[in-house]
Image: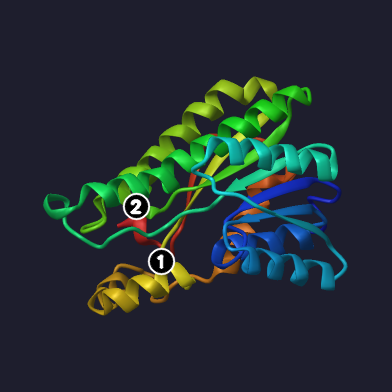
Amino acid sequence: MAEELKGKVILVTGGGSGIGRATCLAVAREGAKVVVCDLNEAGGEETVGFITQKGGQATFIKADVTDKDQVEALIDGVVKAYGRIDGAFNNAGIEGLFESTARYPDEEFDRVIAVNLKGVWLCLRAELRQMQAQGGGGAIVNTASVAGLVGMKKSPIYTAAKHGVVGLTKTAALEFAKAGIRVNAVCPGVIETPMVGRLFDAVPFARDPFLDRVPAGRFGKPGEIGAAVAWLLSDAASFVTGVALPVDGGWTTQ
C-alpha cells in the first residue's frame, strides 16, 4: 500500500509494545495520524517517538480500557487532538493464566474477561458513538485470536473472551454496515511478542507443541499483523466487514 491512510486519524490501544506498536508504525507509514493508547506510559511514549522521528504524527494517551470513564476520556482526547476519529484498532489484551478449565480461579476469570472482552466492548461502543456523531463512516478492527476461532487447551477464559470478541465484531458489523462503518477482527496465531514471551517463560514446555501446530513452521512477527490491520483499516478493504481474519501461518486450516 502507498499512503492508503493519509490524513486519517487512527486510535490503537495496547500501542506500547508488540502487535499494537507494530500496527502504530504500520498505519503511520501509510500516512495516518496515530493516537497511541496504553497503560504503560513509557512504552506508549516510545512508540510515539518512533513515529515522530520518521516525520509522522502521533500522540500518546494513557487509559485503562476496562474503565468506562477512562475509555470515554480517551475518545474525547482523540477528538480534542485531531478533531475526529476515522479508525481504531482495539488491541489491548492479556494472556491470562495457563490452566485447565476445572482448575481456573475466579479472580483470573474476572481479570481476563475485563481486559480482553469488556475492554474491547467499551472501546468499540465509544468509537461507534463518535463515528455516528461525525455522520458515519469509519473502520474498526478488534484483536481476537486463533483462540477466537478454535479451542485452546489450558486457556479456557482467554479462548472464551476471544470468541466473544468475534461475536461482538460480527454483530457490530451487521448493525453499522449501512452507516458506512466497517467492523472486522484480526485473529493472530502465535506471534513473537512480549506477551507470548511471558507465556513461554512461565510454561516453557508449551513452546514446541505450539510451533508444531503451525504449518508455516515458524511463529509470526508483529509486523505481519500490523500490515493486515492497516489493510483492514484502509479503503483498500472498503467492501470487507464482519470478517474474523486469521493471520496464523495456517493454524486454523487444520
Q: Is residue 77 above or below residue 133?
A: below
Q: Which of the 4 image quarters holds residue 166?
A: top left
**Which residue is at a point 60% across and 40% down the rendered structure image?**
71
Q: How many marks?
A: 2
> Which residue is denoted by mark 2 in the rendering?
147
Going 28% across and 52% down the picture, which residue do you hit? Answer: 108
* Picture coordinates of residue 212, whole percent (x, y): 28, 73
Left or right of 96: which side holds 189? right
Q: Amino acid at mark 2?
A: Ala
Q: Secondary structure at mark 2?
A: helix
Q: Is residue 12 left or right of residue 211?
A: right
Please, which colouring scheme is shown? rainbow
Cα separation, mark 2 vs mark 1, equals 10 Å
90 shown above or below 172: below
Specify the label residue 190 is tagged with.
1
**Quadrant of the snapshot with the C terminus:** bottom left
Foreground: 118 or 69? Answer: 69
Please give the name of the residue rendered at 73% of the width and 30% of the height, measured from the top-left corner.
137
CB atoms of marks 2 and 1 within 8 Å: no
Residue at the location (44% across, 61% down)?
A: 248
134 is higher (above) or lower (below) than 247: above
Foreground residue among 216 and 108:
108
